[in-house]
Amino acid sequence: MQFITALQDTQFFNPVYGAGDLKKGKTYYTFSQFARETIDRGLARPLDRAPIPITRFMPTHLDGPDRPQRVLVMFAGGLGDAITVGIVLPTAMARHNLHFDICCDPKKWEGIFKPMASPGRHVPFPPDLDILSGYEAVLCDISDFFPIKEGLKVSPVIQLMQGFHIHDPLIRVAYRIPAEIGQRMLLPATDRKRIGLNLDSNGRIKSYPLKLYEALFSTLRSLDLDLHLFGNKSLTPDLSNGDGLFDWRGKADIPELAALLAQMDIVLGVDSFIVHLADLLEKTSLVLLGTTAPTYFDWHRHIACLQSGLDCSPCFAFADQCPKGYAACKAFEQPGIRPDVIAQTVHSLLYKRPL
């Protein structure tokens, strides 16, 4: 983390930190990466000394005699991580008599934290000195509360629960879809079951290979399903609506996406934000795993996993680089995760009987 002083008024958009404003002469507390990028663009200068002391909120504070109670959470994780935080923090606040406000991208606040009824308030990123003065501590990295540093081997929800000393087996949480959005996104009636598909993640390695799309779609259509495709349009081929295939990629914001997912009978996807959101909506989901371990979803009550059995899987890699040097993950090409096996598993989950 670093303090910077803005050299001019500017509006910014960053794919990680979202949209915001910097005001000339104001000093901000920010992630080091954002500070470097802003300084390199000539928009700010670094401060050699911290203008005010910052207490980094850590697990030891939960039982300490001088426990901070008003804490600013600096959140820059992905959308799936935001759901994890939204699940655990309200219970942590109640359990430890804490007050958390969340400093994050407004898209994550409006699309995730607010519909999950997070009890704190939203603080625009990056916070300035006036804002910081209202807090006793700053939680700079939510993974500080992960007792096991094993990445995708362990459920982050369970990790965060353990970090905050939460031992209840169930945390009751819901995602509230505004009635107006639910009505606007209402799908026409159909006699067929609907399956929501999300086959791309944040990188090629975790995404379903494009060359297998046709075979997968063909086997799913044999089940007499309407296919609703969600995700990132730039990573997948252009497809036309019609003939039981509906392409929603890039056409819905997060609450609209939630309204559509709520109308699915089942969701099929790779390890991505959409399967986390579907579980939050209590939708039965099947997750296709290449680089992620099934234990990552141990907390999720509505998710089943289908793993390839490839010797190097799970490797816990992400983005675009396969440790073996493949252009795409070979896990999705293994017999245990073939399109016909996927279709059989989808049928079993839908109808509670084998195909």
Image (spheres, rainbow, N blue to C red):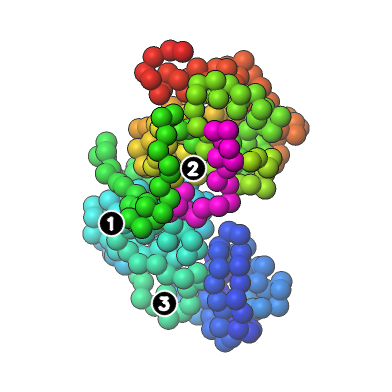
Residue 339 sits in quarter? top right
The residue that label 1 is drawn on is 93
Task: Assign a secondary structure to mark 2.
Answer: helix
Q: Nearer the viewer, residue 55 or 41?
A: 41
The residue that label 2 is drawn on is 274
Q: Is residue 172 left or right of residue 84?
A: left
The residue that label 3 is drawn on is 131
N-terminal label among 3 and 1: 1
Residue type marked 2: Ile
Q: Name the residue located 53 percent from the left edge and 80 percent from the top edge.
A: 27
Does the rendering let one see residue 177? yes
Evaluate if marks 3 and 2 touch, with contact meaning CB atoms under 8 Å apart: no
Residue type marked 1: Met
Queried whether the magenta region covers residue 80, the answer comes back as no
Disc sitting over residue 43 in the figure: none
| Above or below: residue 1 compared with residue 196 | below
Task: Assign a secondary structure to mark 1.
Answer: helix
Residues drawn in magenta: 241-258
